[in-house]
Amino acid sequence: MTEDNEDFLDEELLDPGNVDIDEENKGLYEHVNITVDGKQEPLRIDKFLLNFRQNSSRNKISQTCRAGNVVVNGNPVKQNYRVKPGDQISLLLAHPPRLNVIIPQDIPINIVYEDDDLVVVDKDPGMVVHPGFGNWDGTLVNALAFHFDKKGEKSDLDRVGLVHRIDKDTSGLLVIAKNEYALSFLAKQFFERKTKRLYWAFVWGNVKEDEGTITGHIGRHPKNRMQMYTYVDGSAGKHAVTHYKVLERFKYMTWVECKLETGRTHQIRAHFKHIGHTLFNDERYEGNVALRGVNLPKYKHFVKNVFEILPRHALHAHTLGFIHPTTKKELYFESPMPQDMTDAVKKWRNYLEN
């Protein structure tokens, strides 16, 4: 449970231990378990949940039921199901960050797919996904608002839209829902980690194994609150697992492909720092200095030049696959390596060859 949605919850009906959040997309949706009171009279579940969730509309709850995100005693139910005493209700609600005003802005974005239910965007590095403190405009959401207005489509991105998000300096694929049903349907897939997502990362050093798994709880760093930290002993944080495969080695840097079994904040960045392979040019995690290599002016000058070519942490959301909310068919997308990472690879290859 996050601060952003605590005011929505009736604490008398909720055991805080029953609330689970996908940390990677914290604030976009929540999972709530409810045990119906023994004195509850039969009542349609949409009305019951409307009383329980005072800030939700009946349409939102209806679409949540339609998407299969309301489960009673282990079975998905429709909105006309009547709750009974002792029923165990599991509810997944999608609710992107609430914003006061979204200003449509004519900002170029790379839309790789769009239909009546969703849009898939290949985000450039350096673009913030949604407005927030310090970034009230110039975001992907501002650009999408302009795009929808230009098409004559109703956009209500402060209420529906974002299903997941990636960091400002991470490039790659995102899907945005265009209606309540699509939002609920897609949110369930992300929440249950049923989407197909692979990340590409450049990390410092020569990763020893061709394939491997990093396991360790991830929580806030005990001294540097801007970083996340890997607690191998499980003394803090939440369980996290990252699978990786080496794609190419550059002697002092390695290109890896990552698959996340869990979704924790900065998971790839924190896990690779933990095993001694901080992301290349990741300033927040001290990867913006020559961590590996020779102590020669020529090499240091080379690394400085690569930093100028790739002026951000080297992380890219390469693939995205999910089931379409209406057709129920799988959609799968691949984003090519962005130009800055491509140029960095060429630079490293040339350096090693010469």
Image (cartoon, grey):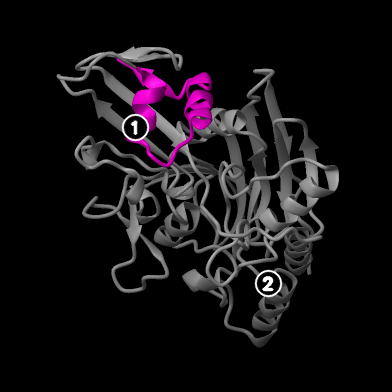
Residue located 78% across and 40% down the image: 153
Q: What's the CA distance linking mark 2 and mark 1? A: 50 Å
Comparing 152 with 227, the one in front is: 152
Residue located 37% across and 35% down the image: 31
Comparing 304 with 26, the one in front is: 26
Eyeballing the image, is 295 above or below 82?
A: below
- Report which residue position mark 2 lands on: 311
Magenta stretch bounds: 44-73
Instruction: Tell me the tag on residue 51.
Output: 1
- Left or right: 135 in relation to 148: left
Choose top left, top right, bottom left or bottom right for residue 192: top left
Query: Residue 117's spot in the image, x, y percent?
Result: 70, 31
- Left or right: 192 in relation to 53: right
Comparing 7 with 240, the one in front is: 7
Disc 2 + disc 1, Cβ < 8 Å: no
Residue located 48% across and 29% down the image: 58
Q: Is residue 55 magenta?
A: yes
Residue located 46% across and 14% down the image: 78
- Left or right: 58 in relation to 173: left
Query: Residue 85's spot in the image, x, y percent?
Result: 20, 16
Secondary element under disc 2, as helix, strand or loop, is loop
Secondary element under disc 1, as helix, strand or loop, is helix
Instruction: State which quarter of the image contains the C terminus.
Output: bottom right
Residue 216: in sight, yes or no? no
Mark 1 residue type: Asn
Q: How many numbered marks have been drawn onto this rendered protein structure?
A: 2
The local crowd at label 1, few if under 14, some if 14 to 19, many if 20 or more residues have their Cα within 10 Å, is few
